[in-house]
Image: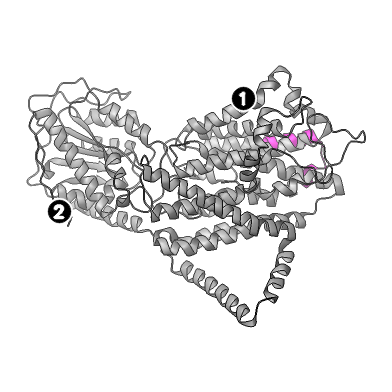
Amino acid sequence: MTTSAISRAAGSSQTAETATEAEPRSGRAPAGRASSGRGARIEGLDGLRALAIVGVLVYHLNASWLPGGFLGVDVFFVVSGFLITTLLLREHQRTGRIALSQFWVRRARRLLPALVLCVVTSVLIARAVSQDLLVDVGRQMLGALTFSTNWIEITAGTSYFDQTAPQLFMNFWSLAVEEQFYLLWPLLTLALLTVSSRVRVGVALSVGLASSVLMAVLFTPGTDATRVYYGTDTHVMGLMAGAALAFAWTNPGLATRVAPSRWGRFGSYAVPLALVVLLAEMVLLDEQSPLTFRGGIVLASLATAVLVMGVVERRPGGVTAIQRVMRHPVSGWVGARSYSIYLWHWPVILLVALDNPSAPGTMSHLLTRVWCVLVTLALADLTFRFVETPFRTLGFRGVASAARGGLSILTLRGRRGLTAAVAVLALGTGVIVVTAPDQSETARMLAENEAAADAMATTAPTSGVTAPVRASATPRPTATGAPSSGAPTTANASFSMPAGTEIDAYGDSIMVGSLQALRYYFPGIRIDAKSNRRWSDGLAEVTARGDGNRRAVILAFGTNAGVDEDRVKQVLDVLGPNRMVVLVNIMGPFARVDTDNATLELVARGRRNVVVADWADAIRAHPEQVQSDRVHPTIKGAHLFSKTVRQAMADLSARNTGKTVVLKELPIP
């Protein structure tokens, strides 16, 4: 994952919160509704925004710290759907109409100025840091500035969860979903104003349910989930939950139905329980879990809807504990700047990671992540003060007028200098976009190595290759993939250190990236590796070769879709107990790294012929030997990968023969 919505709950917070609402003639607000009137503010929603942005930020800093932190996006979706719909309904109650053009202009001045600043600044800095950050940047900028990132990237076939080139504006997909909501929802709201509030609620819930079902149906476990995660059609359940809540909350007859204080004894626990459910999902779910796409996102949206009601309801007994937390000044400060925090955090993380590489689990990594947070908060505060606020309060014309006033005090030379500087920046940005690469160094290297692997496979010599192992004790995979670790090795099993001509290697893009180094350390090795392979592909390839597999086998899968324990066991069963097998563990910015590596250790335990090569530990000490995508090794990293595998093979031999294997140190060519 992935790694969203955050247009300040789409940038609508201040406008919606200060919108007026028609008062009942009695002068008292119905239960569960905030009293209104011009200047009324829905307190506490900034606290929900703060919760959401912290979840997303932590997830992007290190997914293993909060595997389900991406659900913060769905918190923003709910808040945005609630605020935008409330704004539209209040305007209609106050004026008898909805001024669509004014609504869209307000959205533009809330979102576009800060967005343009972030995009241009990030592109200019990225050019100075790494060309890899500019891959397809023209397409990314088009998506960002037209709020179509999600569909453009879906069409381009890029992945939110697995990339060979880091995308500067990957997080803008959710802004696109929200802006598309802003364009279409006011029109549908106008149509819904002709029917009863109950029908409006029903329509919103029906659209949300349809989106949830579509996400569940289109999601295929074990495959990339970008399409269902990015799609507007499959990811509007949170926006619709917020809209349905707004339809009910702004209607005197339905407001009491959604007020937690009116839910009896359960109402006392509903809001704290919703918070617990949301936090638990952020801790327990991840981007690979089928539960995430088949109910998890929906549950997070519903829990957020309950939290919204718990925050906005004015209870007779006074402010609740959760309301106090959500209204705390710190929560308000973070929530008010959540849009700018969301804009800046991902480019900052990428730029800092490339400028100062670090590996998860190290003090250096922790310190660089703290630095990312500080830089992001500083940029967000400056953007909020000097870009967001002026455009929100003055509008485009007001800011232009103020700018002209500021220019008038400059000398002619000063004005010319400023004009020249702006022209240079614009020209420089244009040149960068036009000359940006369409492929990262990582992707180019993988393509070349994969072609070399294919060529080697078709021209591999047959002479000098050790005969394949054939043993009656070699077990075949069972229907359930049950392990056969207890199967004895036969007398003809050899565990001496193998030569390259006695080794088969199967793997994904990590092995593809290490192709030349593996051939250097293991001359004659037979390599079958392709990008995007999973453990299921490894099972198919190993099974297809059958008894033709050499006596030593290297297996390096798991970068894509994680480690499938059953598939790993099935592969080992096919190879049997007489072959030496090295399982290479994984490393990358995935929440599942520790769990996947623990699974490999568990599977290898008790199998005398299997060992785990600890690639994760090796590369953790040398973060500079990883490509810009934070996954694939550099040339030096490929040698480190190969040496780690060679040492694991030597350890496996020593463990079974009792003879220490002395490895010759080879210079990196």
| Residue drawn at (66%, 24%) of the image | 270
Side of 497 where 93 appears, left or right: right
Q: Which residues are magenta?
A: 190-207
Residue 179 placement, left or right of 291: right
Residue at the limit of the structure toward the right, as seen here: 25
Does residue 196 show up magenta in the picture?
Answer: yes
Residue visible at 17% across and 57% down in the picture:
669
| Amino acid type, label 2 | Pro
Q: Nearer the viewer, residue 16 or 289?
A: 16
Q: Residue furthest top?
A: 265
Determine which residue is flagged by label 1.
273
Mark 2, residue position: 667
Q: Is residue 173 visible?
A: yes
State whether the magenta stretch is mostly helix, strand or loop.
helix
Q: Say left or right for 406 vs 500.
A: right
15 w.r.t. 653: above or below: below
Please tell me whether residue 533 is drawn above or below residue 469 in the rendered image: below
